[in-house]
Image (spheres, rainbow, N blue to C red):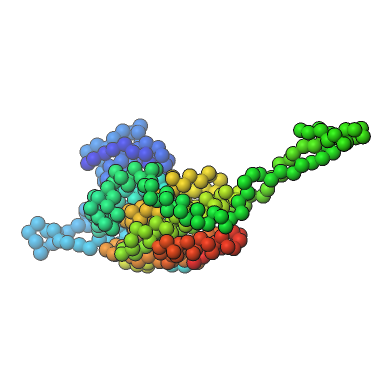
Amino acid sequence: MKTRLIPARFKGRCRVCGKEVLPGQNVYFAKHYGVRCEACGPHTDADAPLPSKRKASSDKKPSPSTPSGKKRRKAAPEASPDTGAMPGEKVAQRYADGVTRYEFGSVTEAVRDALDDYAQNDSSAEYLRRRQGYALSGKDRWGNNFTRSRFLRELSAPSKHLLDAVDLMRQRLVGEVAAPDAPRRRIRRGQEWGEELDADRWLVRDLSPWERSVRESQPRRTVTIGCNLSVNAGAQPNELLYRGAAALALADILTSRGVNVGVVLFYSARDVTSTVSRAVVRYTVKDPLMPLDVSAVAFAMCEIAFFRVVGALGSPRHFTGVLNESLGQAANLPVADRLSIDFLVDADVLGEQAAEGWLRGCLAGSESEVCYV
């Protein structure tokens, strides 16, 4: 048994005292043995495994086919995840439209989850462990030759070519946008007090000879930009690079026009597992009221390695059923998910020319209208 002190990711209860454990609270965790609060201390050899593990052990019967009684078995589609979370807390939910959905509140949360070591059954966990290890070995072209350390480093300090792509997309179109250079102000005359004295009014003994500049608050609108990161296995890095760059350039341009902009990313795929025929995972990148920092989000939006490590390999951790070794096929976003955003650059926008065409189409119309491609 290996026990370690970690921050809890989900609500749960201590296996010893039953005290509620809240997300972020330090707990002792051991695989197959759940969590213990700090007051109860680390796990010991006297601890019993989780009920699902005890049941699995008692139901296991020797196989007459081999002397050791071992027999290769298919993973149970509905097996519980080997985590300290309460059963079902990390399982994606299937909705009435047949789509299985999961949501992350931030990119940081999604990355931590993707780099964890668990799944909804042993078969998926083993496959994801092996595949992710190679994807971050620095030798995998599918993972764009990233290592784990480089991946974590570029999350906050993206490569120059990513920022250059965003800047190029913005420069091509910024001249077509009538962005105000200064806040609008109105000069009010005939005031009892102000910044400047109106000489004509003062000479005629006007009792209100002052002028003052008044800033009129303009209504700030709020829009949400969505970017579907999904690409198929054979896609090249540039095909996703400019899709994300166009979405980020649009966010920057609208922000300069005084609009509150929110940014969300999506993973959308078909036939991911034997029980998940349609899946959507949503990642909140920027809240509308937060300032836009291009360098902080460029890696997540433009780098294909992020999608493949966090989306293609991270999302299946939440899906039940037998994992498809091809990890499914990229798909456009379902209608129900489109309704929650104002601008969407979808999975069928591939390459620089298509991304620029999408961006021009969005800027040509009113940002109050939904822009889909």
Depicted 252 relative to depicted 188: above or below: below
- Residue 33 in view here: no
- Percent position (x, y) of residue 361? 54, 64
Is 117 located above or below residue 59 in the figure?
above
Image-based side of 317 in relation to 227, left or right: left
Q: Residue at x 43, y 59 (%)?
A: 243
Left or right of 185 in this view: 373: left
- Does residue 331 appear left or right of residue 72 in this picture? right
Residue 284 horizontal/vertical position (percent) = 47, 51
Q: Nearer the viewer, residue 13 or 177?
A: 177
Q: Is residue 358 visible?
A: yes
Q: Residue furthest right?
A: 204
Quarter occupied by the N terminus: top left
Residue farthest along the left direction in this orientation: 67
Residue 211 image offset from top left, x and y in percent: 80, 37
Q: Nearer the viewer, residue 22 or 175?
A: 175
| Residue 296, placed above or below residue 26 | below
Which residue is depicted at the point 54% across and 52% down? Answer: 253
In terms of image quadrants, where is residue 198? top right
